């Protein structure tokens, strides 16, 4: 006698399943009803032979605004006075767009400055070594 195949879905360590489905199962996970933070989806499947398989899928919910912090990193050791910039922005759609505060200010990376200096240095070197009036031809 064959058993009925089924997929049981649990959220975090709940004893009551989120849902029981017959494969192939399609469901919509409404994250607005789940608190922000780290969660785990546990999926149990039973084959037609009665063999059970389990898969755990960790995920993170962030329905609230994105929080960006400049001036302080995770587990950083700081001393004295430290300037910290905190910005929070979400994906709410509004009719007006506020430019101030919509982006988190960040410094230009040092590799960009290094590339710019190398490029300008080569341009100056090339100009000095290859420029003379004999090679200059006017269109007039």
Image (cartoon, grey):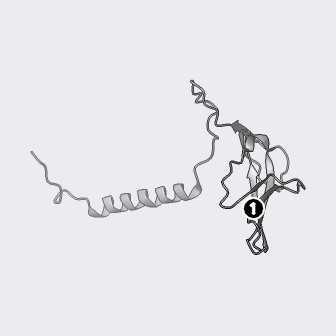
Name of the residue lying farthest toward the right: 15
Residue at 47% from the left image edge and 55% from the top image edge = 116
Q: Count the numbered circles shown.
A: 1
Q: Position of residue 48 (x, y in %)?
A: 73, 71
Residue 79 lies, with reference to residue 32, above or below; the image says below
Rendered-image quadrant of the N terminus: bottom right
Q: Position of residue 103 (x, y in %)?
A: 61, 38
Rendered-image quadrant of the C terminus: top left
Name of the residue lying farthest toward the left: 140
Residue situated in front as seen by the camera: 49 or 135: 49
Task: Left or right? Give the position of 103 relative to 37.
Answer: left
Task: Left or right? Give the position of 13 relative to 65.
Answer: right
Assess disc 1: are there few (<14), some (14-19) or many (≥20) residues with their C-alpha within 10 Å of its C-alpha.
some
Quadrant of the rendered image containing residue 106 = top right
Name of the residue lying farthest toward the front: 1
Quadrant of the rendered image containing residue 87 = top right
Residue at 63% from the left image edge and 41% from the top image edge = 105
Determine which residue is flagged by label 1.
7
Residue situated in front as seen by the camera: 48 or 18: 48
Residue situated in front as seen by the camera: 120 or 25: 25
Residue at 39% from the left image edge and 62% from the top image edge = 122
Q: Secondary structure at mark 1?
A: strand
Residue situated in front as seen by the camera: 105 or 128: 105
Residue at 57% from the left image edge and 24% from the top image edge = 95
Residue 47 lies, with reference to residue 115, above or below; the image says below
Name of the residue lying farthest toward the top: 96
């Amino acid at each position: 006698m064959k058993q009925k195949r089924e997929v049981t879905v649990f959220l975090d360590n709940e004893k009551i399943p989120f849902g029981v489905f017959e494969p192939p199962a399609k469901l919509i996970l409404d994250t607005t009803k789940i608190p922000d933070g780290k969660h785990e989806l546990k999926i149990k499947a039973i084959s037609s032979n009665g063999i059970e398989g389990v898969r755990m899928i960790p995920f993170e919910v962030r329905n609230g605004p994105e929080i960006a912090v400049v001036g302080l990193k995770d587990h950083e050791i700081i001393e004295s006075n430290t300037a910290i910039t905190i910005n929070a922005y979400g994906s709410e759609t509004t009719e007006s767009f506020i430019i101030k505060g919509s982006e988190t200010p960040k410094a230009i990376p040092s590799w960009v400055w290094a590339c710019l200096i190398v490029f300008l240095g080569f341009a100056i070197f090339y100009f000095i070594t290859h420029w003379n009036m004999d090679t200059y031809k006017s269109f007039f």
